[in-house]
Image: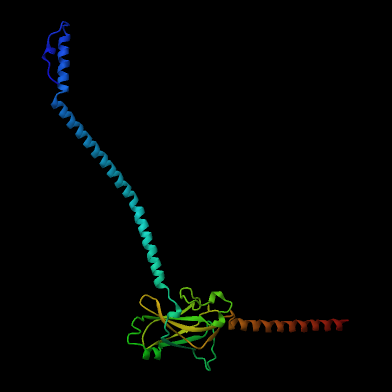
Amino acid sequence: MPFDSTRLAPTTFGNFQSSSVSLDLCLIAKFSPSYIQSRLESSSLSAIRHHSAAAAAAAATRSQALSAMAPAMGQSLLCGAWVLFALLSFVDATVLFSTLPRTLAVEDEIQDQVPAMGLAKAGDDHLVIRWVLNATAQEAAAPGLDASYEKVSLKLCYAPVSQVERGWRKKNDDLHKDKTCSKAIATQKYTSLGNSTVWRITKDVPGAVYFVRAYVLNSNGTQVAYGQTRNLITIEPISGRHASIDVAAAIFSAFSVGSLIFFLALENMRGKRSSGNK
């Protein structure tokens, strides 16, 4: 805006002159280029600062949101990994009996039973079990067949005749669901020369017909082969009666009979005395 010097002329209103000059100077200063430039720069800086503050606040909000979501995301990832691991472990651990090769020869007998009758008593008799890599496997198999063999697990198994109408004894091709061999006998280190063990038939073995099966385990404890006995053994369950109980019962019975005879003879003598006194 051009400067008009006439506006600085004195006025007839006395003190109003100085006030007018001050007002004009303020207007000139207000609309001067340097003032406008400084105002623009100040406005730009304010806008930049406001935008930076808003951006910083938004970044802080996003950071807080991510921090809050991190534990939940971590837990979700951990749960997903655990489920995947469990599924893979289940798939790897599933062993079908039909896929196992029969590479062991297993024999058993009741200790000190002559002649062998195949009848044992729970809690009293002992079972002698022997196992070895069978001849067929030794001859036909390539070297290193038993390289993965680590241990041999011996189990007492229900024979088919003792599984009839007993669902809790039924066999299943999936060894994790199989109920045939529920009684563990022993676990031994594998050797191609074989091994043996003597097992006392425990009192909790129910009466049934049994056979012995040996599972070959690898370093992970997974069944990789097996063998089992051909002959069957009948186990009689413990009756709960002991010889001392039978002896005590016999003594009590004899005492009862003797007491009865004594009292009958005494009554007979009293009857005769009564008759004589009359």
The one nearer the camera, 145 or 214, is: 145
Q: Quadrant of the C terminus?
A: bottom right
Measuring from the top left, give residue 156's x and y in whole percent: 49, 81
Name the outermost residue toward the top.
12
Note whether residue 237 is visible.
Answer: no
Quarter of the rendering containing residue 255: bottom right
Can you say whether 1 is above or below 54 in the image? above
Relative to 140, 173 lies left or right: right
Residue at 24 percent of width and 36 percent of height: 50
Q: How many marks?
A: 0
Note whether residue 255 is visible.
Answer: yes
Residue at 83 percent of width and 82 percent of height: 271
Measuring from the top left, give residue 145's x and y in whole percent: 35, 85
The one nearer the camera, 258 or 52, is: 52
Can you say whether 230 is above or below 54 in the image? below
Residue at 17 percent of width and 13 percent of height: 20
Relative to 90, 268 lies left or right: right
The one nearer the camera, 245 or 106, is: 106
Q: Quadrant of the N terminus?
A: top left
The one nearer the camera, 253 or 180, is: 180
Colour scheme: rainbow
Name the outermost residue toward the left.
5
Measuring from the top left, give residue 128's x and y in whole percent: 46, 87
Residue at 37 percent of width and 78 percent of height: 218
Name the outermost residue toward the right.
278
Can you say whether 37 is above or below 171 in the image? above
Measuring from the top left, give residue 5's x and y in whole percent: 11, 14
Relative to 252, 61 lies left or right: left
Relative to 94, 57 lies left or right: left
Name the outermost residue toward the front.
2
Quarter of the rendering containing residue 91: bottom left
